[in-house]
């Protein structure tokens, strides 16, 4: 099992709103070596500039056709899913206060 840090730009995705309503989200998977059971920490960019969430990876290599779009309302960008993109399913484990693990 490995630990990863992935970024979130709050201008493009309301990660706080998503994890307020949902226990799991599907996130674009850029590193092919992330595996189920790994831990992912989500770093939220400006204005937060801190690690805000700890998640467990439940599933990897999810195709755009298999993505659970229940978090789509938290997508603030105009970009939709690209067919070639792979995703991973993340389960929220812990929320950190914005001043605990800062940049």
Image (tube, rainbow, N blue to C red):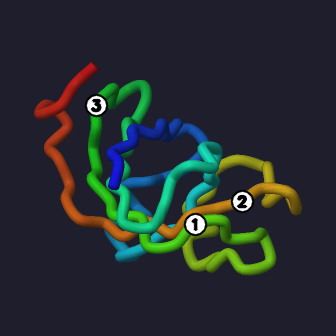
Q: Nearer the viewer, mark 3 or mark 1?
A: 1
Alpha-carbon distance for marks 1 and 2? Answer: 8 Å
Q: Position of residue 4 (x, y in %)?
A: 39, 42
Q: From the viewer's perspective, is residue 22 above or below residue 4?
A: below
Alpha-carbon distance for marks 3 and 1? Answer: 25 Å
**Marks 1 and 2 close (CB-CB < 8 Å):** yes
Which label sits on residue 50?
3
Using a 10 Å C-alpha cutoff, classify the residue at mark 3 as few (fewer than 14 neighbours), some (14 to 19) or many (20 or more).
many
Using a 10 Å C-alpha cutoff, classify the residue at mark 1 as few (fewer than 14 neighbours), some (14 to 19) or many (20 or more).
many
Q: Position of residue 66 (x, y in %)?
A: 72, 80
Which label sits on residue 86?
2
* Residue of label 1: 60
Q: From the viewer's perspective, is residue 33 above or below residue 84?
A: above
Viewer-side residue, 33 vs 62 = 33
Tell me the element at label 3. Answer: strand
Rendering quarter of residue 97? top left
Which label sits on residue 23?
none
Viewer-side residue, 68 vs 5 = 5
Residue at 70% over, 47% down: 77
């Amino acid at each position: 099992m490995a630990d990863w840090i992935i970024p979130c730009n709050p201008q493009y995705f309301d990660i706080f709103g998503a994890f307020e309503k949902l226990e799991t989200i599907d996130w674009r998977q850029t590193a092919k070596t992330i595996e189920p059971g790994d831990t992912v920490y989500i770093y939220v960019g400006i204005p937060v500039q801190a690690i805000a969430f700890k998640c467990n990876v439940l599933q990897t290599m999810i195709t755009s056709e298999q993505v659970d779009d229940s978090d789509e309302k938290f997508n603030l960008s105009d970009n939709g899913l690209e067919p070639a993109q792979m995703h991973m399913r993340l389960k929220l484990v812990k929320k950190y206060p914005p001043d605990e693990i800062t940049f």
